[in-house]
Image (tube, rainbow, N blue to C red):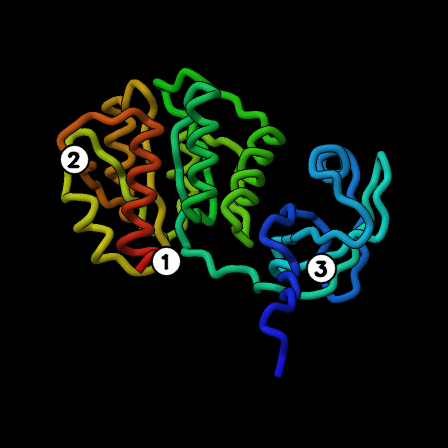
Amino acid sequence: MADQHSPKTPAWPPKSAPRLFVTQELGEGAQVTIEGAQAHYLGRVMRVSVGDAVILCDDVTGEWATRVESAGKREVVLVAEQMLRPREQVPDFWLCPALLKKDRFDTVLEKASELGAAKVQPVIMRRCVADKLNPERARTILVEAAEQCARTALPELAAPVKLDALLRDWPAERTLFFADEMGGPPAAEAFQKHQGPAALLIGPEGGFDEAERAAVLALPQTRPISLGPRILRGETAAIAASALFMGLAGDWT
């Protein structure tokens, strides 16, 4: 009879193991060299040593348990030992938010990643305060949010485009839900009935001007929706509507 007081084998990898996204495609036995800021994080912040576990995701195959083979000041070498989860199936949902002031748009990026958006397409409109986006900084925010909430897939980050260019090149098969300040069917009702590729267009701090609103409504794939009786900030509208979509038409069901 087994000794009931014998210690249990600790779970491996432990839940406390650090998580990182890497650009190298992973497979059993693959060796991964971590450098730069990620190496600093593993070595100086998490203080990993030989034999420790690190969770890696490659945004292609999925999530892997790796073991530290060597840990130096400038690089950490890991070896992939076991696939933990395949890359998640992501709802075909694009978030198309107007560019906002930096800190507010940072929040939109972070929450889009957490909520499971497949793509973030920033849009430049006439009343946007901002007209530029630092792509490296934006990608870092998306990646760190995905690492924090244990995602195995990253949102695609598209370069900002002007609204007229977005509408001109809009794919025929994708519904564009338009958060229209002038009203429309309740968003929950529209989302619940929807099937297929979708996107959500959110306006800037000052809202859409009349010409922009007319252009959006002229697109055959547009479906105007209402986000309720209150006027929401751009970042609040993007987050609330994305969460509502995931709950009614995405992968929260």
Q: Residue sitting at 68 percent across and 59 percent down? A: 65
Q: Examine the image and state in which quarter residue 136 appears.
A: top right
Quadrant containing the N terminus in the rendered view: bottom right
Residue 239 image point, x, y percent:
34, 37
**Of helix, strand and loop, which one carries label 2?**
loop
**197 or 50: nearer the viewer:** 50
Q: Which one is earlier in the sequence, the residue at label 3 or at label 2?
A: 3
Q: Amino acid at mark 1?
A: Asp
**Of helix, strand and loop, which one carries label 1?**
loop
Residue 147 image point, x, y percent:
57, 44
Q: Nearer the viewer, mark 3 or mark 2?
A: 3
Q: Residue sitting at 20 percent across and 50 percent down? A: 190
What residue does disc 1 label? 251
Q: Looking at the image, is 118 positioned above or below residue 165?
A: below
Count of marks, rendered view:
3
Residue 27 image point, x, y percent:
73, 64
Q: Which mark is residue 242?
A: none
Left or right of 232? Residue 119 is right
Q: Amino acid at mark 3?
A: Leu
Q: Residue sitting at 18 percent across and 38 percent down? A: 226
Q: Looking at the image, is 106 positioned above or below residue 60?
A: above
Quadrant containing the C terminus in the rendered view: bottom left
Disc 2 versus disc 1: distance between alpha carbons?
A: 23 Å
Q: Examine the image and state in which quarter residue 216 appears.
A: top left
What residue does disc 3 label? 26
Q: Which one is earlier in the sequence, the residue at label 2 or at label 1?
A: 2
Q: Which one is earlier in the sequence, the residue at label 3 or at label 1?
A: 3
Disc 3 versus disc 1: distance between alpha carbons?
A: 26 Å
What residue does disc 2 label? 228
How crowded pointer 3 is (Cα within 10 Å; few <14, some 14-19, many 20+) is rated as: many
How crowded pointer 1 is (Cα within 10 Å; few <14, some 14-19, many 20+) is rated as: few
**213 or 11: nearer the viewer:** 11
